[in-house]
Amino acid sequence: VQLQASGGGLVQAGGSLRLSCAASGFSLERYAIGWFRQAPGNEREAVSCTSGNYNYTYYSDSVKGRFTISRDNAKNTVYLQMDGLKTEDTATYYCVSDLLCTETKMTPFGEYDDWGQGTQVTVSS
Protein backbone atom coordinates (compact mmCIF):
# COMPACT_ATOMS: atom_id res chain seq x y z
CA VAL A 1 0.00 0.00 0.00
CA GLN A 2 1.65 3.16 -1.17
CA LEU A 3 0.86 6.72 -2.13
CA GLN A 4 3.25 8.63 -4.36
CA ALA A 5 3.08 12.40 -4.62
CA SER A 6 4.40 14.12 -7.74
CA GLY A 7 3.98 17.18 -9.89
CA GLY A 8 5.80 19.78 -7.87
CA GLY A 9 8.18 22.30 -9.34
CA LEU A 10 9.24 25.90 -9.54
CA VAL A 11 6.64 28.42 -10.59
CA GLN A 12 6.23 32.18 -10.42
CA ALA A 13 3.71 33.75 -8.13
CA GLY A 14 0.29 33.71 -9.75
CA GLY A 15 1.07 30.53 -11.66
CA SER A 16 -0.39 27.06 -11.44
CA LEU A 17 0.69 23.51 -10.72
CA ARG A 18 -1.17 20.24 -10.53
CA LEU A 19 -0.02 17.72 -7.98
CA SER A 20 -0.80 14.03 -8.33
CA CYS A 21 -1.17 11.40 -5.65
CA ALA A 22 -1.02 7.96 -7.22
CA ALA A 23 -2.03 4.90 -5.21
CA SER A 24 -0.57 1.45 -5.62
CA GLY A 25 -1.50 -1.72 -3.83
CA PHE A 26 -5.06 -0.59 -3.09
CA SER A 27 -7.97 1.19 -4.69
CA LEU A 28 -8.34 4.67 -3.27
CA GLU A 29 -11.91 5.01 -4.48
CA ARG A 30 -13.37 4.26 -1.05
CA TYR A 31 -10.77 6.10 0.97
CA ALA A 32 -10.34 9.64 2.10
CA ILE A 33 -7.15 11.16 0.71
CA GLY A 34 -5.58 14.32 2.00
CA TRP A 35 -2.78 16.73 1.23
CA PHE A 36 -0.52 18.20 3.87
CA ARG A 37 2.39 20.56 3.38
CA GLN A 38 5.41 21.58 5.37
CA ALA A 39 7.71 24.52 4.84
CA PRO A 40 11.16 24.65 6.42
CA GLY A 41 10.90 25.71 10.05
CA ASN A 42 7.14 25.36 10.06
CA GLU A 43 4.80 22.72 11.37
CA ARG A 44 3.05 20.43 8.95
CA GLU A 45 -0.20 21.98 7.76
CA ALA A 46 -3.39 20.39 6.49
CA VAL A 47 -4.24 21.67 3.02
CA SER A 48 -7.10 19.73 1.48
CA CYS A 49 -8.84 16.38 1.43
CA THR A 50 -11.50 14.44 -0.40
CA SER A 51 -13.63 11.89 1.38
CA GLY A 52 -14.02 8.35 0.10
CA ASN A 53 -17.72 8.72 -0.50
CA TYR A 54 -17.27 11.81 -2.73
CA ASN A 55 -19.50 13.84 -0.50
CA TYR A 56 -16.94 16.02 1.20
CA THR A 57 -14.01 18.12 0.31
CA TYR A 58 -12.07 20.27 2.72
CA TYR A 59 -9.80 23.23 2.10
CA SER A 60 -7.79 25.18 4.60
CA ASP A 61 -8.55 28.87 4.74
CA SER A 62 -5.14 29.62 3.27
CA VAL A 63 -5.92 27.80 -0.01
CA LYS A 64 -9.69 28.04 -0.28
CA GLY A 65 -10.72 29.47 -3.62
CA ARG A 66 -7.32 28.78 -5.20
CA PHE A 67 -6.82 25.02 -4.88
CA THR A 68 -9.11 22.28 -6.14
CA ILE A 69 -8.93 18.62 -5.16
CA SER A 70 -10.29 15.92 -7.45
CA ARG A 71 -10.16 12.20 -8.12
CA ASP A 72 -9.72 9.99 -11.15
CA ASN A 73 -10.64 6.54 -9.92
CA ALA A 74 -9.80 4.94 -13.24
CA LYS A 75 -6.23 6.14 -12.76
CA ASN A 76 -6.32 5.52 -9.01
CA THR A 77 -5.09 9.06 -8.52
CA VAL A 78 -6.07 12.16 -6.57
CA TYR A 79 -5.10 15.56 -7.91
CA LEU A 80 -4.54 18.93 -6.31
CA GLN A 81 -4.90 21.75 -8.81
CA MET A 82 -3.17 24.81 -7.42
CA ASP A 83 -3.94 28.13 -9.06
CA GLY A 84 -3.01 31.63 -8.03
CA LEU A 85 0.07 30.36 -6.26
CA LYS A 86 1.69 32.58 -3.67
CA THR A 87 5.18 32.54 -2.24
CA GLU A 88 3.74 31.31 1.04
CA ASP A 89 2.58 28.14 -0.73
CA THR A 90 6.22 27.10 -1.00
CA ALA A 91 6.55 23.78 0.84
CA THR A 92 6.90 20.06 0.47
CA TYR A 93 3.50 18.56 -0.20
CA TYR A 94 2.52 15.12 1.03
CA CYS A 95 -0.52 12.98 0.32
CA VAL A 96 -1.86 10.52 2.85
CA SER A 97 -4.79 8.26 3.53
CA ASP A 98 -6.15 7.04 6.90
CA LEU A 99 -7.81 10.26 7.80
CA LEU A 100 -11.22 11.69 8.50
CA CYS A 101 -12.28 14.18 5.87
CA THR A 102 -15.31 16.40 6.28
CA GLU A 103 -16.24 19.79 4.93
CA THR A 104 -14.81 21.49 7.98
CA LYS A 105 -11.75 19.47 8.93
CA MET A 106 -9.27 16.80 8.03
CA THR A 107 -7.92 14.71 10.86
CA PRO A 108 -5.51 11.78 10.65
CA PHE A 109 -6.66 8.70 12.50
CA GLY A 110 -3.23 8.43 14.07
CA GLU A 111 0.43 9.17 13.63
CA TYR A 112 1.92 8.38 10.24
CA ASP A 113 5.02 6.21 10.30
CA ASP A 114 5.97 7.24 6.79
CA TRP A 115 4.95 10.44 5.05
CA GLY A 116 6.78 9.49 1.88
CA GLN A 117 9.10 11.81 0.00
CA GLY A 118 6.47 14.33 -0.89
CA THR A 119 6.83 16.72 -3.79
CA GLN A 120 8.48 20.12 -3.56
CA VAL A 121 6.59 23.22 -4.62
CA THR A 122 8.55 26.44 -4.87
CA VAL A 123 6.83 29.69 -5.73
CA SER A 124 9.06 32.61 -6.65
CA SER A 125 8.12 36.26 -6.42
Image (spheres, helix red, strand yellow):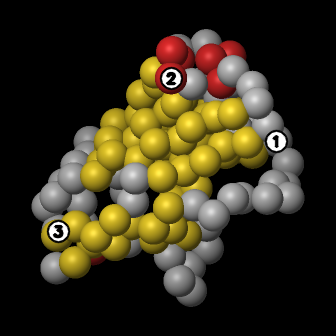
Foreground mark, 2 or 3, reads 2
Image coordinates for residue 35, horizontal then vertical, percent: 55, 48
Viewer-side residue, 86 vs 118: 118
Q: Which residue is mark 1?
A: 109
Left or right placement of residue 79 versus residue 102 in this view: left
In the rendered image, is residue 46 in sight? no
Q: Which mark is residue 71?
A: none
Left or right placement of residue 28 versus residue 9 in this view: right
Q: Which residue is mark 3?
A: 13
Q: Which residue is mark 2?
A: 75
Viewer-side residue, 110 vs 93: 93
* Residue in view at x 22 percent, y 78 percent: 124
Q: Is residue 82 above or below residue 88?
A: above
* Residue in view at x 53 percent, y 83 percent: 40
Q: Disc 2 vs disc 3: Cβ atoms closer than 8 Å? A: no
Badge 3 amino acid:
Ala
Q: Quadrant of residue 69?
A: top left
* Residue in view at x 41 percent, y 47 percent: 19
